[in-house]
Every structure is written in C-alpha cells, then in structure tokens.
C-alpha cells in the first residue's frame, strides 16, 4: 500500500479514536469531584449562588461539586486559575462581568476574558440596590445627591472589587446623577458590607441579597433599587427611574464557565444539569428569597450574552474615564 495512503488512514484512525474517546469520557463524566471556583470572598452574594448551585448540581451529576474561593485582583485570580486548568470539565468558574470583561480591560491579566473560556450556562443574576449607612444625612436619593454636590469627593462608596458590578453600578450612579463619590474597592461583597455596616463606608450599590438583612435590621438605609421594577422583597423602595435616574440600572450576572477546549459533550452535559437544577423548587425558592433571577441558557446563548454585555461595558468604561492599561 502507498505510504501516503497509509499516512491518511493513520490520521483518520487517530481522529476516530479521539472522537470515540471524547464520547466515552463525556458519557462517563463526571468520575470525580468537580471544583467550582468563586473568584470572590466567602460569605458574599456570589458565594451564596455558588454554593446553592454546587449543592444541587452535585445531585444532578452524581458527584460532589466543591466551591473553592479564590478572591482578589478584580476576580482575575480565580478566573486565571480556571483559564489555566485542564479543560476536562472538572474545574469550573463562577464567572462575572469583572472576571470576563472589566478586569481584563482595566488591568493586565494572564488570560483573555472571553477567548480563554467555554461558557457553559448563565447563572442567576442579581439587581443592585443603592444603600447608605444610617449616619449619612440622606433619607432619599435627592438628599444624597444634594449632599454629594455640597461636598464633592467627600462621600465614598464601596464595592466588591475594581471592575465588579457594584463598582460599575457606582460609576453609573455618579455619571447619571452628576456627582463625585470616591470608590473604595474590596476583595468581595462580604468585607465591603462589613465596613459599610460599621460606618467606615458611606454608600454602596451592591447586590440586593447581600444588603437585604442589614436593611431589614435597620443597619443600612435603602434609597433606590437598580432595576426597572421594584423588588417584592422591598416594595417601598423606588427604582432609579422613579427618582429621576433612569439609565443608572445595574445588576450582577454570573455564568458557569470552563477552560477553553473543554469537550462540547461535557459542556452540554453540565449545561443540561444546570437547566434541571433551575427547575428544583427549593433552588427557585432560595433564589427568589435573594431577589435573584433565574434564566436557563444554552452554551451558545450564554456566549452571545457575555459578548453583548462586553460591548455595553466598554462604552461605560470609556464614559466613566476608568483607567485602561
């Protein structure tokens, strides 16, 4: 037989073997525990979603799903860890706008926020809520704006990190209300909320779920909800549009993402498991209690969602004059 023919047959055989191996591995997957990396500190809103998702996902996949917190550097530490992981489905990221879009734009990171990942599914999203410490002499948004304009650069607001939704939510508020607030970034929502409740911070535009217990306890004052409609959890709190700040709406979205090159059958298997989790009554009840919205998306739809948000975020970063490296 001709040498060229032998080489062609060898290549074909290799491809068939590879496809067969992928098929078998996808069918068997998972055969060991899965790690879901949360790029934020433990105890915050992202952590709650990660742990709830991991618990029910373990039931659907028949293997434990362990949440591992790797906070810091605008979510790039956790994202970089997953980007470098073996693309076998056993290391996943609770992705965010910061990890995939903002941080790679405003600082140097060792990964591409979109190209280095295989997006699996959209995780629950959480609208933000503008709150202030009770010592701040503002009982509504109008008074907060007046206070900020009377003392430019004297009021601060905290976030769960540079480039996070609470950071961009604060910048949107500043742009829309034409006020000057000083941004104080943290390694996650939990430490930021700790300082906010203690009075070391004065304001924040963070996830409703993280702030809600403190609002209910009177330790934080809610001024406006950063969504297009009021939350049933705080029905008396107006939306930004209702107080004349339409366009300042913001929310934290999360994805489940795997390293680039993860076999499509494995991505699809995890996606189907997540979609089933979203039908669990207890999971839905827990998300409703946090004000989180649950939307099932295919891997392709999730990828489009992230890319479209990236375009909007670039425009905001330019408008807010955030430093691009």
Image: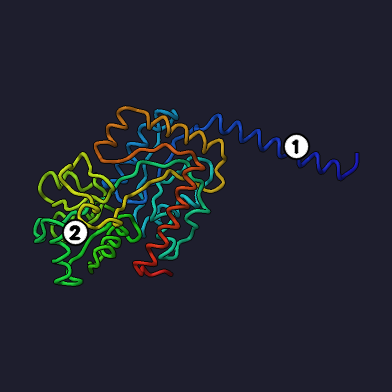
Which quadrant would residue 80 be assigned to in this image?
bottom left
Give whichever of 301, 211 is nearer the camera: 301
**Does the image show residue 180?**
yes
Q: Secondary structure at mark 1?
A: helix
Q: Secondary structure at mark 2?
A: strand
Q: Residue at x 42, y 42 (%)?
A: 122
Does 183 sit left or right of 4 as displayed?
left
Residue 176 location in percent, x, y?
27, 62
Residue 234 location in percent, x, y?
18, 43
Q: Residue at x 37, y 62 (%)?
A: 316
Q: Is residue 231 above or below residue 151?
A: above
CB under 8 Å between discs 1 and 2 = no
Is label 1 or label 2 in front?
A: 2
Q: Is residue 91 above or below residue 84?
A: above
User: According to the image, label 1 marks what residue?
Assistant: 13
Q: Is residue 122 above or below residue 184?
A: above
Q: Which is nearer the N-term, disc 1 or disc 2?
A: 1
Residue 102 location in percent, x, y?
40, 59
Q: Residue at x 35, y 60 (%)?
A: 163
Quarter occupied by the N terminus = top right
Task: Tell me, for residue 131, which label it has, or none.
Answer: none
Which quadrant would residue 137 be assigned to in this image?
bottom left
Give whichever of 229, 278 is nearer the camera: 229
Quarter occupied by the C terminus = bottom left
Which quadrant would residue 184 be assigned to in this image?
bottom left
Answer few, some or many: residues within 10 Å of disc 2's Cα (few below 14, many 20 plus, some between 14 and 19).
many
Task: Tell me, for residue 203, which label it has, or none.
Answer: 2
**Does the image show residue 160?**
no
Q: Residue at x 34, y 53 (%)?
A: 71
């Amino acid at each position: 037989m001709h040498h060229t023919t032998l080489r062609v047959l060898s290549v074909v055989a290799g491809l068939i073997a590879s496809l067969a191996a992928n098929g078998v591995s996808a069918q068997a997957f998972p055969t060991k525990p899965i790690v879901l990396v949360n790029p934020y500190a433990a105890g915050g809103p992202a952590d709650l979603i990660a742990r709830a998702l991991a618990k029910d996902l373990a039931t659907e996949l028949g293997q434990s799903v362990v949440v591992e917190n790797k906070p810091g550097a605008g979510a790039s530490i956790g994202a970089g860890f997953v980007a470098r992981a073996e693309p076998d489905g056993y290391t996943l990221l609770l992705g965010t706008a910061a990890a995939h879009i903002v941080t790679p734009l405003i600082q140097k990171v060792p990964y591409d926020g979109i190209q280095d990942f295989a997006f699996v599914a959209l995780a629950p999203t959480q609208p933000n809520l503008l709150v202030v410490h009770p010592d701040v002499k503002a009982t509504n948004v109008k008074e907060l704006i007046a206070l900020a304009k009377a003392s430019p650069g004297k009021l601060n607001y905290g976030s769960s990190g540079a480039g996070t939704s609470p950071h961009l939510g604060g910048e949107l508020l500043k742009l829309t209300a034409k006020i000057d607030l000083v941004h104080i970034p943290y390694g996650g929502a939990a430490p930021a909320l700790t300082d906010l409740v203690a009075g070391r911070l004065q304001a924040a535009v963070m996830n409703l779920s993280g702030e809600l217990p403190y609002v209910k306890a009177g330790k934080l004052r809610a001024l406006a909800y950063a969504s297009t409609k009021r939350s049933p959890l705080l029905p008396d709190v107006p939306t930004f549009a209702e107080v004349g700040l339409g366009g300042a709406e913001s929310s934290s979205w999360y994805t489940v993402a795997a390293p680039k090159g993860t076999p499509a059958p494995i991505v699809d298997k995890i996606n189907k498991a997540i979609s089933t989790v979203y039908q669990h009554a207890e999971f839905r009840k827990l998300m409703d209690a946090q004000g989180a919205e649950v939307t099932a998306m295919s891997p392709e739809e999730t990828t489009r969602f992230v890319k479209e948000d990236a375009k909007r975020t670039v425009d905001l970063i330019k408008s807010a004059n955030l430093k691009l490296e």
